[in-house]
Amino acid sequence: MIFTCVTFVFFTILVAVISYVKTKGDDQTTADGYFLAGRGLPGIVIAGSLLLTNLSAEQLVGTNGQTWAIGMSPMAFEVMAATALIVLALFAAPRYLKSGITTIPQLLGERYDRPTKLWFSIAYIILYLFVQIPVILYSGSLVFENIFNLSGTLGITKFQSIVILCILITIIGSIYAIFGGLKAVAVSDTINGVGLLIGGLMIPFLALNVLGHASGSDSGVAIMDGVRYLIHNHADMLNSIAPAQSEAPAVPWPTVFLGLVFLGFQSWCTHQSFIQRVLAAENLKEAQKGALYCAFLKILGFMFLALPGVIAYAIFNIEGTQVSMMDDAYPALITRVVPQPVMGFFAAVMFGAILSSFNSVLNSVNTMFTMDIYKEFINKNASDKKLVSVGKNIGIVFAIFSMIVGPMVYFFPAGLKTFLDSFVMLVGLPVLSGVFGGFFFNCLPKYSARFIMVFHIICYGGFMLLSPSYSLFGGNEGTMHYLYAVSVLWPLEMLIMYLMHRHNKRKGAEVWVQEDVGAVDLTPWKYRNIVSVIVIVCVVLVYLAFSPLGIGA
């Protein structure tokens, strides 16, 4: 345990030192310097920061917990994200950089009006503070509780341990987000991203080796024996194609091409904490490189975000030690398969992933409050120095609030990933409609995005409250998957916006034309199209492998 703690502290401090050295000469006194890293991020840093912003303990714990429970269908969240990153690179990024925006609500304000900007800023801040950041804090605390057994060491309850860990993560993470700005967050993300790929990809191989020995192999290295056992005995768990009437956390196969794709557009093309990395690119070429590099990383992600859950099921089944909750499966696997000499390194990698997501979302919520609410509605004449000061102060307030709310997620037993993904669409989908609809239709009335938000919250909120059964449509008695609601609502909302556009156009409304503010060079990456095709081919190949046509037979 002492060696584990020492190596953990060493790697954690190493990342902090490198981040400090890389950013100590940067100008943090201007709004662009603090909130957008001076608009100077290269593609490789954008890719690493995008990956780590998305990937945290709620992904590692949540998705692997889902695959432990129902098989490989949740891998769709990772693999299909690559298609959304193509849309980000080819469609969204050029338009965002053309406008020179700092936040997504700012874009909505320019496209529609000031009330729209205020509405969406408040909605996003509430979503981040009450859902996303608390889930990140809780899931990170859960992992560390299981790795270090803090409750047993200190003689306290598991919930008390989670409270202590939430406080520690908040304090350390806030130092990056509040005092380092976006550049410090992005640099630490890149370093942690390398560590996460090494540590994360290590897990399935270690787990397969343990599975091979547990199944009776006497080979020194039993990885292939573990693979054979898994395919021969649990091929059904390796099938990523779930029935159309599946309940969450499974992903019904029709929604993979509809609701899940729309959720991907929302996450990767309009989510402030992701988009802020692209907005900070030094030019369009680097933004497109970053998005497409990240697409390959997301395809590879099923190796450490989905497959370990299935291997855990097989190991625990042989040993008779199955856990009782989805969110306990991955931490239990880690303590079972990771050798003690490398446990500290893996813990540091996990900690980096947790900090990266926490830092990124906290930085984004600070940015939206400062730039979209304070500067727009409280102090229009605020200097850059004042804006940076406000961003830091409000960041401290938000961090303390999140630290209080985070432990409360302990009382949601349905699973971290389902909890987060289903609730984020309450606000996320209207943002997607407002942004994409604004680009597609140039004669929309000023109130259209606000109307869509109210319409969506009523319809989707009603769906979540009523939890309709498949039996309404002649199916089983299971609860209908939330991705079906997303599959229907987004096309419907886009249709409503199209009808508003046509009606307004007939009345002779002014045509909206996006202006190029000259923020960065908009010359595209010349290999963007061929790389996008390669990404799509890789997605298809992975799905074929984990299907009844491959090892999921």
Image (cartoon, rainbow, N blue to C red):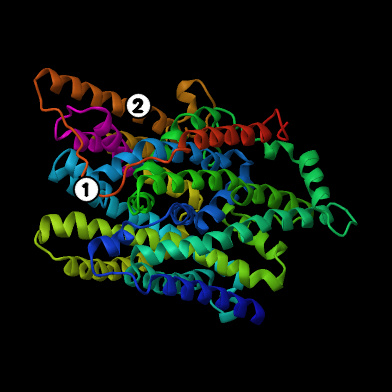
Q: For the residue labelled by badge 1, is the local secondary structure a helix, a strand or a loop? A: helix
Residue 312 is inside the magenta segment: no
Predominant secondary structure in magenta?
A: helix
Q: CA distance from mark 1 to mark 2?
A: 24 Å
Looking at the image, residue 225 sits to the left or right of residue 371; the answer is: right
Instruction: Name the kind of residue labelled 2 in the image.
Output: Pro
Task: Report which quarter residue 434 is drawn in.
Answer: top left
> Residue 129: x percent and y percent?
33, 58
Residue drawn where x is 37% and y is 70% of the image: 174
Query: Where does residue 151 sit, x and y in percent of width and height?
Result: 56, 75
Residue beneath disc 1: 106
Disc 2 target residue: 491
Q: Is residue 66 visible?
A: yes
Mark 1 or mark 2, which has the lower sequence index?
A: 1
Quarter of the image with the N terminus is bottom right
Does residue 93 appear left or right of residue 152 in this picture? left
Asked whether, in this view, residue 440 is left or right of residue 553, the answer is left
442 magenta-colored: yes
| Magenta stretch in the rendered image | 427-454
- Residue 464 spot, x, y in % from top left: 38, 39
Mark 1, Cα crowd under 10 Å, few <14 / some 14-19 / many 20+, is many
Front residue (pair 470, 25): 25
